[in-house]
Amino acid sequence: MVKIEILFKKKKIRKISETEIERYVNFFENSYKDNLEHSKSNINDFPRWSIISGYYAMHDITKLLLAKKFRIKVESEVHATTIKVLSELIKNKEILKLIQKGYKEFLSLAQDLEEAKKERIKAQYYTGTKFMHEEYKRRAIDFHKEIVLKYLEKIKEIITSEF
């Protein structure tokens, strides 16, 4: 585990100033909802993008939680740092397991998409087979139901609770 103080010293996180808190919170309240909606609406046609958007909904609501409850803004290495901060502040193992699964899936797809881009494969970055499309669709549905929605619900509970 990384101590919060070390992340502050390394300038990976900082306290959010009074003048920017409202704008910052407002951005993430809308951003996680936009990403969630994008994820839902793309499950059938673009399941890989659905998974990526679902992870971003998780990431953004986590940053919303950090801002609202702790006035913390993540400044660098945002994905890994966000998970480190969450691990230090929230000791719920189920929540941590969900975000780590989401991040792992995101990294896997991001790597696939980058490799596909380099190889100039199809525009949607699929192998082109119906089988693979259906496989990613199944993964996207499972990811959405078992990871994204569960995680969002748990983080919303924390945000609205008296911590």
Image (spheres, helix red, strand yellow):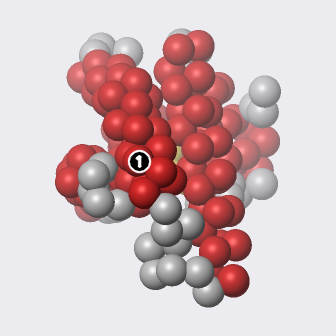
Name of the residue lying farthest toward the front: 130
Up-down: is 151 above or below 48? Answer: above
Depicted 150 relative to depicted 91: above or below: below
Quarter the C terminus occupies: top left
The residue closer to the viewer here, 25 or 16, is 25
- Is disc 1 placed on a helix, strand or loop? helix
Q: Is residue 22 left or right of residue 136?
A: left
Q: Tell me which corner region of the image, top left, top right, bottom left or bottom right, holds residue 34.
A: bottom left
Task: Pick the residue in front: 159 or 152.
Answer: 152
The quarter holding residue 119 reads bottom right
Looking at the image, which residue is at 59% across and 32% down? 101
Please provide percent x and percent y for residue 7: 72, 45
User: Could you tell whether 28 is left or right of 147 in the image?
Assistant: left
- Determine which quarter of the picture holds residue 127: bottom right
Depth check: give the residue in front, 90 or 59: 59
Binning the other alpha carbons within 10 Å of mark 1 as few (below 14), some (14 to 19) or many (20 upward) gives some
- The residue sitting at 67% across, 47% down in the picture is 80
| Amino acid at dot 1 | Glu
Residue 25 seen anywhere in this rendered image of the structure: no
Residue, disc 1: 134
Query: Which quarter of the figure is the N terminus placed in?
Result: top right
Position in image of residue 74 (x %, y %): 56, 53
Q: Residue at x 47, y 51 (%)?
A: 131
Question: Residue 88: percent from the left, percent from the top?
Answer: 65, 26
Q: At x 21% / y 54%, what residue is drawn? A: 41
Number of numbered discs: 1
Residue 151 position, x and y percent, is 40, 27
Q: Is residue 70 visible?
A: yes
